[in-house]
Amino acid sequence: MNTGGGLQEQKLQELLTYAGRFSPFYREWFALHHIDPATIRTLDDLSTIPPTTKEHLQRRNMDFLCTGRDRIAEYTTTSGTLGSPVTIALTHNDLNRLADNEYHSFLCADGSAGDIYQLMLTLDRQFMAGIAYYSGIRKLGAGVIRVGPGVPALQWQTIIRLEPTVLVAVPSFMLKLISYARENHIDLNRSSVKKAICIGENIRHPDFSLNILGKKITEAWNIRLYSTYASTEMQTAFTECGEGKGGHLQPELLIVELLDDNDRKVGPGIAGEVTITTLGIEGMPLIRYKTGDICTYDDQPCACGRTSLRLSPIIGRKQQMIKFKGTTLYPPALFDLLNEMEEVLDFVVEVYSNEVGLDEILLHLVPAARTEECDHRIRSYLQARLRVSPHIVYIDAAGIQKMQFPEASRKAIKFLDRRK
């Protein structure tokens, strides 16, 4: 499934020896499952090691650490989307690896030293992505403008004054930039911005065509969009090239497998759980770690000339699958539906258990108008597309902002899982 097999196998052997010696968790894991790291020589041999999960990392967090605390340069945390947050500790070498990862990611996304990147995300609150983007751009030799998240007025003041060429932003926030520009008579296409690195949300369908969010951005604003997928645990990003046909694997940094429900590898184009083995990490390396993200992959050479495996956009997260009145849904599919509707300005999707333990969906919506006609169009559209009718509550913009950005949140929350 991966290119660069020889290099990966060499790094894999180094990783297994290292983790087996220095990680309390993996020492026990190998002993429990009678794994001798010395016998694992190839990528195919890797499948003899049982996968680990988020629950292992949550329960035994610091037992994954392979170094003394005196060698840790930075402590980061996951966002806690699928449960309690996890700490990921990085050494100085890990931080350099992180910078190198994003340097190659920005190159993949047609970046150059001549670009100026406006970062519309937090660089604090133990957020790995912020420091990763910043470090990668510095390594690229490009300019950085650290504006932080939110505040369309400030973002536009900065764009007009400092003329960035690339935005790093959540796609749904870019719709707010477009709306602000229209309301304030700013000509989007006369701005300095030519590209956007889209983080945290899908802009494409699994077949790589633009979804409604991607279309809304590009129809209003003549800029190129590049999607990226990463997680704190993998300390590596899959970033699109200009072809827009999936995020490219960096094989020197990561081994990736897509597994079915029985932990068997799936073939190209078949949905499976992204399972990663990190290469070259000193602090908290991970071996066959199941991310919970469901994707497909393509292993054919890309038109850009790269031959590494490419991942599709996230189809959904395994733990977030919703079974609603006989219909199976993932949140991204619901987000696409809601983004399609002109009658819906913003939203949060909540899922909870009813009195008999079945999934129920409650949509918190900011409607374009508080009228019976608007309500009827929203309900009719959802019924037609979903074949079932979720519960709806209407809320104003201030209320949805509080839901999406609770205290200490690092990114907008659009899915609330309140199931028992």
Image (cartoon, grey):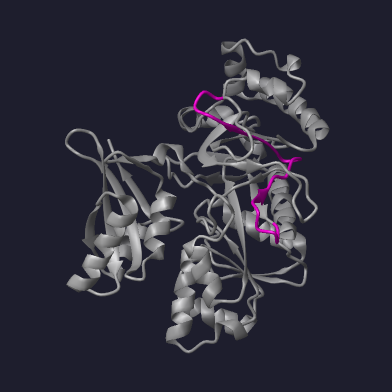
**At which x and y percent is residue 223?**
62, 73
Q: Residue at horizontal 78%, vertical 45%?
A: 307
Type of secondary structure dominating the magenta stretch: loop
Image quadrant where residue 284 sits: top right
* Visible residue check, residue 348: yes
**Residue found at the very far right of the displayed protein:** 6
In the picture shown, does residue 324 fall above or below 405?
above
**At which x and y percent is residue 243?**
70, 59
Image quadrant where residue 10 sits: top right
Q: Which residues are magenta?
A: 241-263
**Which of 404 and 89 lies nearest the eye of the viewer?**
404
Q: Residue at horizontal 73%, vertical 48%?
A: 96
Q: Which quadrant of the rendered structure holds the C terminus?
A: top left
Q: Is residue 256 magenta?
A: yes
In the picture shown, does residue 238 fall above or below 377?
above
Q: Is residue 125 magenta?
A: no
Q: Residue at horizontal 76%, vertical 47%?
A: 301
**At which x and y percent is residue 122?**
52, 61
Residue 135 lies left or right of residue 403; in this view the side is: right
